[in-house]
Amino acid sequence: MNIKSLLLGSVAAMAAVTGAHAADAIVAAQPEPLQYVRICDAYGTGYFFIPGTDTCLKIGGKVRTEGEWYDAYNPKSKVGTLWHDRAELRVDTATDTEYGPLKTNAIFRWDWNDGGATSSKLLFANISLGGFTVGKLDSQYNLYVGYAGNVANDDVVYDGPYELNQLTYKYDPGNGFTAIISVEDSNSGGNATYFSDADPAATHDWVTSKQDHYAPNVVGGLGYTTGPWGFKIVGGYDSIVEEGAIKARIDADFGGWKAFLMGGWNTDGNKLNQYAGTNLNTDGAACPTNRADCGWGDWALWTGFTAPINDKLSANAQFAYTDSKIFAATANVQWNPVQKLLIQPEISYTNWNAANTDQWAGLLRFERNF
């Protein structure tokens, strides 16, 4: 009996120990709580919180492919047909602070053309807080007034500089009135050569070096919007040429049908500056012999419209004319068969009366935004 009792007791003890170990083996560790991405709608559609932070992030961009037939900007271009591809990545951030939203904006661009020609660049990179913006953007001379028309070839008649560093303050109390002042990099505005003689045929008084220049350009503007109407005026001063230009624009929105009228005045029509002329002529090179096919002269005009045809189709047109007798007309149809997909055929005509030449050009664009 004693041996039997001992054996039974041993078996029972082993069973208890085995059961305890088995129970321990199936007890899983508690999972860490998951951090789901939270939507951040305080700054617009598409923002979400970066997990573990109070910073909101938005990622977007576009992919574009297009065929171009001849060049609306240059009638002597030898390229009859060109296929162009572009990809852009846009990254925006926003964080709430005691001074308002602290925001950043960066756009990276990659281009490829027929023949294998490629390029890439940092298109925009800027920081904004409390109405101030510092970094790379298009000049406020263009950005503040809304550029020109809703067409691809909108700046055949030059409307101002793009892609430059700046320190800008924008005042917007939310009542329709806005004001802006911007100090901008005079050495990155796109012009490398300036005309400085009253004789438009002169070849000896061109300013071609800006390397020693230190003074910035200045842009200022005022605007007011009420109901369907909007008015803005902006002026730019080129510190290298010591001249500038003023543009005034009126916008009207008649319930889908939109139109604009914009006029520009050059402080000295015999000189090119970053706000009223470009450094390219109809040969695609700097203008050493005749500034009439480069700049406005004393003034320039732009007008255009957008007319909806249905909820997926609209027609757009823009017309421009200058004191130097440059005429440019562009028309397109924009079709959005599905959301965020654009198909846009466009045709342009430009006439340079002073150079006694003209040009027809066409474009077919496919663009997906995200």
Image (spheres, grey):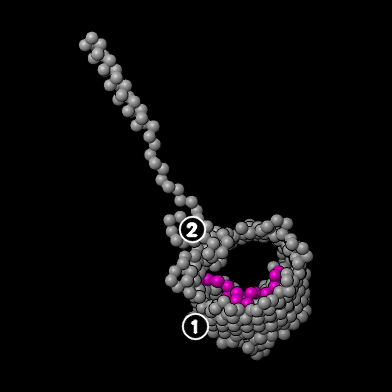
Identified by mark 2, the residue type is: Phe
On screen, 347 above or below 319? Answer: above
Q: Tell me where the magenta segment starts and ends, as one range.
A: 134-151
Q: Which mark is residue 193?
A: none
The reply to whether the magenta stretch includes residue 147 is: yes
Could you say whether the residue bearing mark 1 is in a helix, strand or loop?
loop
* In the foreground, 351 or 228: 228
The residue at 43%/56% (across/down) is: 52
- Indicate the position of residue 274 as horizontal and vertical percent values: 60, 80
- Indicate left or right for 163 with 84 as reference: left
- Indicate left or right for 97 with 264 as reference: left
- Indicate the position of residue 69 as horizontal and vertical percent values: 74, 64
* In the foreground, 233 or 1: 1
Q: Which mark is residue 215?
A: 1
* In the foreground, 9 or 233: 9
Identified by mark 1, the residue type is: Ala
The residue at 39%/36% (across/down) is: 28
The residue at 65%/86% (across/down) is: 266
Kindly identify which residue carries mark 2. Answer: 49
N-term-proximal mark, 2 vs 1: 2
| Quadrant holding the C terminus | bottom right
On screen, 291 above or below 108? Answer: below
